[in-house]
Image: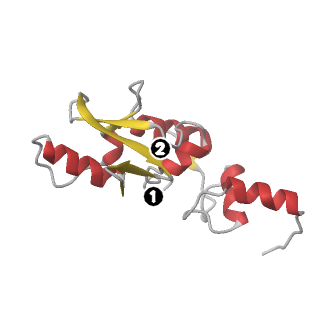
Amino acid sequence: MISIDIDDEVYSLLTNQAIAFVEKTPNDVLKRLLKITKSTGQPIDQREGKIRGRKKPKTNLSDLVSAGLLVNGQELFLHDYQGNKLNGNKAKLFNGFLLYNAKSYSMSDLAQILLKENGFKSDSVRGPIFWYTENGKSIKDLWDVFLKNHYK
């Protein structure tokens, strides 16, 4: 590995761009900003939305906020399996999690709890397909846009 010197101003900018609990070093931040894929250096297969030979990365709300596709404090709304909004079922986005009744949840965990409260019985829920913005965009669709723009 090659070492480089950077000044305090550049280091400060890198730390401000870091995604908490995901990027542990300035190198991780630079890789994301320079659109270099994770440790393998392998390109993304755009047709399948996968890193060649691997599944595409899991939806990360912090990445969506960093990319400007979502905003901390924004309300997200739960929809059912057919895409119908379940009135009264909403949560606020905060630091990569959903806040609901003063507790922090992953998208999948909170979707499962609220879907059960609304009479659905699934024990396996993929959260991004159930959460939508106020203007009707699903988190899954926003994640697909993110992957397309950040893993070229």
Q: CA distance from mark 2 to mark 1?
A: 10 Å
Residue 76 seen by the camera: yes
Q: Secondary structure at mark 1?
A: loop
* Along the line of sight, the residue nearer the viewer: 1 or 117: 117
- Relative image position of residue 92 (x, y in whole percent): 41, 43
Which residue is under mark 1? 54
Q: How many marks?
A: 2
Residue at the spot 25% in from the left edge and 34% down from the top edge: 88
Q: On screen, 95 above or below 136?
A: below
Which residue is under mark 2? 49
Residue 152 seen by the camera: no
Q: Secondary structure at mark 2?
A: loop
Q: Is residue 12 left or right of residue 29?
A: right
Residue 88, numbered label: none
* Along the line of sight, the residue nearer the viewer: 43 or 99: 99
Q: Is residue 105 left or right of residue 125?
A: right
* Along the line of sight, the residue nearer the viewer: 106 or 39: 106
- What type is the residue that disc 2 sits on? Gly
